[in-house]
Amino acid sequence: MDSQTVVHNGGCHCKRVRWQVRAPASVVAWKCNCSDCSMRANTHFIVPSERFELLGDSQQFLTTYTFGTHTAKHIFCKVCGISSFYIPRSNPDGIAVTFRCVDPGTLAHVEIKNFDGINWEGSYNRTGIASSSKVETEGPK
């Protein structure tokens, strides 16, 4: 995937939660079958947390749900209920952005990969998903 970043804007259905994220125009999104993601049909791409910014007064409209290990923070709008982003268990140092919540026009391509959340540990080790929230440094030119 292209590593050059662009600014994507997005948010929830009622538009009370708005954010910006710097990510490539082509992303790898993860379709997870864990109990929560499968119920929400969530497919997300992961970025380092420093590349994500909540805008305006969005924070006041957010609430969080956790379960199991309580590592994942499932964040959603208190008004419309949409989870446009969250902190994933696989990448607690990053942000998982629901790709369908990105405003149209900046995502050129989304490659969807499967993450077996039912067999979480095996999928975590096999997929390399943990690297998704790491900032890539440029090498010598």
Image: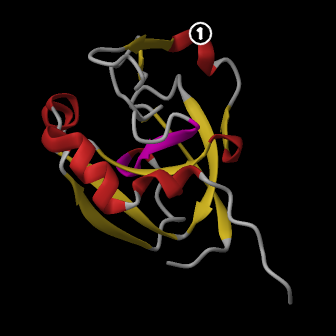
Magenta segment: does it hold 13? no
Q: Farthest residue toward the right?
A: 141
Residue furthest to the bottom in view is 141
Say left or right for 46 vs 8.
left
Query: Could you say which is closer to the camera, residue 26 or residue 80?
Result: 26
Classified by dominant secondary structure, the portion drawn in magenta counts as strand
Q: Residue at x 47, y 50 (%)?
A: 102
- Report the quarter where the C terminus lies: bottom right
- Comparing 87 with 125, the one in front is 125
Is residue 66 rendered to the left or right of residue 22? left
Picture residue at 22% right of the left edge, 50% below the top: 122
Residue type at numbered disc 1: Gln
For the image, the number of numbered tags is: 1
Residue located at (20% from left, 28% from top)? 36
Q: Position of residue 62 (x, y in %)?
A: 50, 14
Does residue 85 sit above or below 99 in this rendering?
above
Task: Identify residue for label 1.
Answer: 60
40 in relation to 102, above or below: above
The image shows residue 116 at horizontal and vertical percentages of: 18, 49
Question: Which stretch is magenta?
Answer: 93-100
